[in-house]
Amino acid sequence: MSPLTEAGLTAVRAPAPWETEDDAYPGAPIRRISARLVDGLLPVAAAAAVALPFVEPARDHIEAKIAAVESAGVTEDVWLVDGTTGPWLALVLGVFLLVGFLVEALPTALWGRTPGKALCGLRVVDMGTRDRPGIGAAVIRWFTHTVLWWSVIGLIGVVLALFDRPWRQGWHDRAARTFVAGRRPARPRRTAGAG
């Protein structure tokens, strides 16, 4: 037990210089979209870089399978994913998920920011504590977003988040009990002599 709790006092964490009461304000939609583009580009670029060497061999393999079926004169299904192309696809998907985790879930849990959100002046906060989410919430948030986005349902969630009030939460935010916070919009200043 600490001396503070023995004295009946509780310690209050002093806010960091960039944290103010105004931080618990929903991030502007244009900033959120910009941050999402930056954060989404990194895993896609990494997966594309890994996939590039496999494009031509995969195409040649599939064309050879089609030619073999045509020359045999039979009607048969030709699967695009098989014992040859399957491991390549698994590698590309694995790189996408790993980089996505390293770019989105891990920084969200550690600092409450992804590279895109840091660039756009946003942070992810827990609904209850207004502090950065833990690793569990960060992984739920990232995984839910990734699964929904790649099933195209995520686009609906993004549109709905634009109209959600008061926190502009996407489905991934609701699943993790988080929201994206930004700075409160600046209030217009009154100038001297203005009526």
Image (cartoon, grey):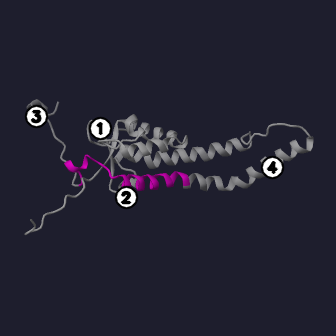
Q: Is residue 138 magenta?
A: no
Specify which label sits upstream in the sequence, 4 or 1. 4
Q: Secondary structure at mark 4?
A: helix
Q: Amino acid at mark 4?
A: Glu
Residue 156: % across, % down: 47, 42
Q: Amino acid at mark 1?
A: Met
- Spatial distance from mark 3 to mark 2, Cα to Cα? 38 Å
The quadrant holding residue 48 is: bottom right
- Spatial distance from mark 4 to mark 3, Cα to Cα? 74 Å
Quadrant of the rendering where the N terminus is positioned: top left
Residue 28: % across, % down: 33, 53
Which residue lies under the disc numbered 1?
A: 127
Q: Main secondary structure of the magenta part?
A: helix
Specify which label sits upstream in the sequence, 2 or 4. 4
Which residue lies under the disc numbered 4?
A: 63
Q: Do callouts 1 and 3 mark residues in contact (Cβ within 8 Å)?
A: no
- Spatial distance from mark 2 to mark 1, Cα to Cα? 22 Å
Q: Amino acid at mark 3?
A: Leu
Q: Is residue 34 magenta?
A: yes
3 w.r.t. 124: above or below = above
Res. 19 visible in picture: yes
